[in-house]
Image (spheres, rainbow, N blue to C red):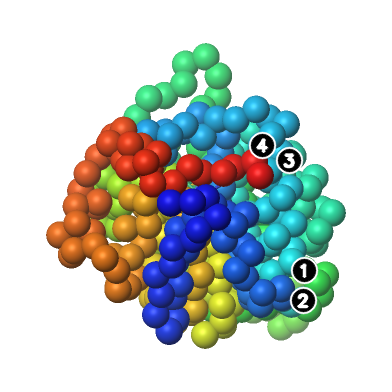
């Protein structure tokens, strides 16, 4: 497949584009997207189906600015952007984003660490997410849709004597900027064969907070299509880009789109453990063009 040729799969509400992020962005009109969630390759040597995500730092930063520029082009004036990355890239990402958007919150996604424990340094158990908006004050924030239990009020049943007359503490509150969601693990119901699959619960909170029913949501690095799946569950429209054919198949299955693949072929992607097999398919059909 030619780098510039993009294959799409769609129905009335969802569209998946198989191709390089910068090429796919060319299909999107300016100021047309209400919410963008972007979770790019981390540039720390993760193995994405046999393809390493490690690049020279200068190239990576330059590339990051190119697609952030595209995000700025397609987001609506009252739109919101959530951008994740590895902790290693947080500083650079923050500096670039400040040029284009208002940073409303620097969120810590905290999860339980398991498996190999670091012995020579403090192991990492969080990932940063920038919550940003195009306008400083005019944006969607559906606080009532994302309330969580406020322990002081609901479990300890305390009374706030600073109020006149004294009142019970609220039993619900808007979450702070530290979010606790377990990572997706093998054999969990939602598990897909992708090394950095984000949990449905994380995307659910983002989508409920910053979009309304039928709004258009974009994920330029869709991976296992958690964002697309959450849009399906929460009644939003969705556009997703992804360069890896195997991950495109996950998206087609999760969004129930028509395609040339058989049901059996689409199911197989869920079960197969990461291998180098599709690197071959990948290289034969399409060369990812990261730095054009
Ligand atoms: C960190 S993962 C995203 C994971 C996703 N949020 C999920 O929940 O599964 C990044 C994804 O970006 C894709 N990717 C990397 N470079 C790309 C490019 N130049 N164009 C399009 N997709 C790319 C990778 O194949 C990978 O699936």
Is residue 104 left or right of 188 when viewed as pictured? right
Report how far apart the C-alphas of labels 2 and 4 lie in the structure.
27 Å
Q: Tell me the element at label 2.
A: strand
Is ligand 1 within 8 Å of the beta carbon of the residue shown at mark 1?
no
> Does the CB distance between marks 4 and 3 fall below 8 Å?
yes
Q: Mark 1 and mark 2 in contact (Cβ < 8 Å)?
A: yes
- Determine whether 42 is above or below 223 in the image: above
Name the residue located 18 percent from the left edge and 63 percent from the top edge.
262
Find residue 18 and report its image quarter: bottom left
Q: Which residue is mark 4?
A: 60
**Residue located beneath label 2 in the image:** 77
Q: Position of residue 28 (x, y in %)?
A: 62, 70
Q: Are marks 3 and 1 in contact (CB under 8 Å)?
A: no
Identified at 32% across, 42% down, the residue is: 281
Which residue has dot 3 on it? 62
Residue 260 image offset from top left, x and y in percent: 26, 65
Rendering coords of residue 202 (x, y %): 48, 60
Q: Is residue 128 above or below residue 232?
A: above
Residue at the limit of the structure toward the front, as seen here: 2
Q: CA distance from mark 2 to mark 1?
A: 6 Å
- Residue behind mark 1: 134
| Label 3 secondary element | helix
Q: Which dot, 4 or 1, sits closer to the camera?
A: 4
- The crowding category of the residue bearing disc 3, from other C-alpha atoms within 10 Å (few below 14, some 14 to 19, many at least 20), is few
- Depth check, mark 3 against mark 1: the one in front is 3
Q: Give the spatial CA distance, label 2 vs label 3.
A: 25 Å
């Amino acid at each position: 497949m030619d780098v510039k040729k993009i294959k799409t799969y769609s129905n009335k509400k969802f569209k998946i584009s198989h191709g390089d992020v910068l090429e796919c962005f060319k299909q999107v009109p300016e100021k047309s997207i209400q919410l963008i969630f972007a979770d790019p390759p981390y540039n720390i040597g993760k193995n994405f189906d046999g393809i390493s995500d490690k690049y020279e730092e200068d190239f990576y930063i330059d590339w990051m600015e190119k697609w952030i520029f595209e995000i700025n082009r397609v987001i609506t004036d009252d739109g919101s952007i959530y951008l994740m990355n590895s902790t290693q890239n947080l500083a650079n990402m923050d500096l670039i984003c400040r040029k284009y958007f208002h940073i409303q919150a620097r969120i810590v996604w905290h999860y339980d660490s398991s498996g190999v424990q670091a012995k020579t340094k403090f192991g990492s158990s969080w990932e940063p997410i920038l919550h940003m908006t195009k306008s400083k004050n005019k944006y969607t924030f559906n606080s009532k849709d994302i309330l969580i239990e406020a322990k002081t009020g609901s479990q300890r049943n305390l009374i706030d004597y600073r109020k006149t007359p004294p009142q019970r503490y609220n039993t619900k509150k808007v979450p702070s900027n530290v979010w606790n969601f377990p990572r997706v693990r093998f054999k969990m119901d939602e598990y897909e064969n992708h090394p950095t699959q984000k949990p449905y619960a994380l995307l659910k909170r983002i989508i409920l907070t910053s979009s309304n029913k039928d709004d258009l949501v974009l994920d330029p690095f869709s991976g296992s299509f958690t964002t697309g799946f959450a849009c399906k569950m929460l009644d939003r429209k969705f556009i997703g880009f992804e360069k890896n054919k195997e991950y495109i198949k996950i998206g087609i299955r999760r969004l129930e789109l028509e395609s040339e693949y058989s049901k059996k072929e689409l199911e197989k992607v869920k079960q197969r453990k990461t291998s180098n097999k599709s690197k071959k398919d990948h290289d034969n059909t399409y060369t990812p063009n990261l730095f054009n």
